[in-house]
Amino acid sequence: MTKLARFARTVGLALLISLPWTPPLGADPFAAVVDGRLLSFPEDTGAHPDYRTEWWYITGWLTDDAGHERGFQVTFFRIGTGIGADNPSRFAPRHLILAHAAIADPTNGRLIHAERVERALEPLAGAAQGATRAWIGDWLLALEDEHYHTRIDADGFAFDLILDPPGPPVLNGRAGFSQKTPNPQNASYYYSRPQLAVSGRLSIGGRERPVSGHAWLDHEWSSEILPDEAQGWDWLGINLHDGGSLMAFQMRARDGDELWAAGTLRSGDGRKQILDPDQVRFTPQRHWTSPRTGARYPVAWTIEIDDQTWHVRPLMDDQELDGRRSSGVVYWEGAVFVEDAEREIGRGYLEMTGYLDRPTDL
């Protein structure tokens, strides 16, 4: 859900840089998201080029052989430009591919991040149908023999990781139909793969170390535009220590009030509860102001999930990703702890958008 918003700005910049055409006028060339479509796996782990925007998003925690803990993120996005659909040339600019990667390291004090964006053109960049495979150059995310593999090599850090799902995808919303506002037309197809077991290697500061940990994968696709009354959102993906998981989000109105909320709570024994808007509440507890952008983020929260109250606190405050030189979007996305009244009960990632720039796509 949350990453799709970055595409609107990314496309504007990429088109200005590399594409000498303008989008065609007339009917929307992209498919609509409709309630009742059945998701099928592994086919729906791959790309859906009939839809405007799509992303594969992995976040998690890594522990190296010295016991040092860090957060990590890797996201691949595909966007349909609405250009070149009737052009048989393989060079027609039908899709753009964007990738973000980041490491949250408390010893560094702020995110280390990198970005890439390219026109989809094999073998340079693309997103394959039928099973997950998205790449830009040597950056890769792929589903191979029921295991995910991601490889990132950037200035200042690199990682090569295998991620093993413990079970089938978890469908969010109504069997994967995820409504984002009171209007059901504002929706996406959305599933998660929590509790991924991670192993591999991380290179940072010129030193490579073996790492292990747990991660979360989200895959979402849509053709919808964020309505005018929405300002941004707050999203959580949490791996609970009992083997369960929580996905929860709220869409914020321009006045800061909740416009919509929803979630999926899965217990350690696999039972799933779909959370309605009245069962999810985000209440900010502490704010941090970026010294670079001036954006003020609520980095600590109380989350009410049905009849439970949990507390969210960050691994570190400065997990802002300033993408204005490439994608044009500034947002906060970082590793967090989740606690109840007595103890830590989970870890995961929090994303917050619209505190400096208003996103546009769902």
Image (cartoon, rainbow, N blue to C red):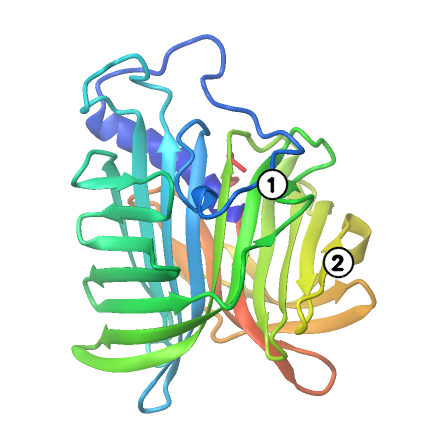
Q: Is residue 111 visible?
A: no
Q: Nearer the viewer, mark 1 or mark 2?
A: 2
The label on residue 360 is: none
- In front: 173, or 73? 173
Residue drawn at point x = 22 percent, y = 15 percent:
88
Q: Which residue is mark 1?
A: 231
Q: Residue furthest bottom?
A: 66
| CA–CA distance in space, label 1 to label 2 | 17 Å
Quick check: 151 left or right of 315? left
Name the residue: 43% across, 54% down.
57
181 displayed left or right of 20: right
Quadrant where the C terminus lies?
top right
Q: Quadrant of residue 226?
A: top right
SS state under label 2 = strand
Q: Earlier in the sequence, mark 1 or mark 2?
A: 1
- Where does label 2 land, which residue? 281
Disc 1 marks a residue whose amino acid type is Gln
Vertical arrangement, residue 310 with respect to residue 305, above or below: below
